Image (tube, rainbow, N blue to C red):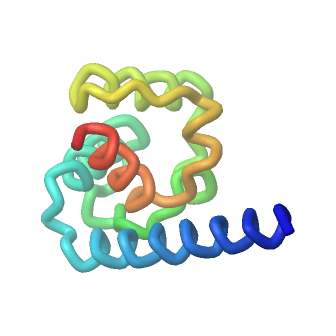
Amino acid sequence: MIQIHQRSLRKYREACMTAAKQQLANQAANPTFLKLQALLAEITGNDAEDIFPDSLIHEEFNMTPLELGRFLAHIDVDLGVKITRDELESIDSLADLALTIDETLS
């Protein structure tokens, strides 16, 4: 019974995150996304135009440990949200990260 409840909660949360991520993807002018986009472009050398809300943080940017540390430090200083490396590991896309930051700040 507990497992069924936990699975239902997990599916509900995933559905909510998917809907929220889609909303962010449709709103590419989201200030948090734009700041993250500029930050990733600066740190990784990628063109900002090639960084999208659904860009996968770990797979597409291949940041070194130093770059990852700089990225997290800038999120803390520039956006006012402390995210650990472990927390970032559980976040897949830039939209998910922007959503996490926006939810933390609200």
Vertical position of residue 79 compared to residue 36: above or below: above
Residue furthest front in the image: 1
Vertical position of residue 60 compared to residue 105: above or below: below
Q: Is residue 13 left or right of residue 11?
A: left
Give the residue at x 40% y 25%. Answer: 82
Give the residue at x 46% y 72%. Answer: 16
Q: Quadrant of the C terminus?
A: top left
Q: How many marks?
A: 0
Compare residues 99 and 38 and report the one nearer the observer: 99
Give the residue at x 21% y 45%. Answer: 35
Give the residue at x 42% y 50%. Answer: 97
Q: Is residue 45 left or right of residue 92?
A: left
Residue 40, position as x, y percentages in the image: 36, 44
Residue 93, position as x, y percentages in the image: 49, 60
Q: Is residue 60 left or right of residue 41?
A: right
Residue 24, position as x, y percentages in the image: 28, 69
Q: Quadrant of the N terminus?
A: bottom right
Compare residues 36 and 40 and report the one nearer the observer: 36
Compare residues 55 and 101 and report the one nearer the observer: 101
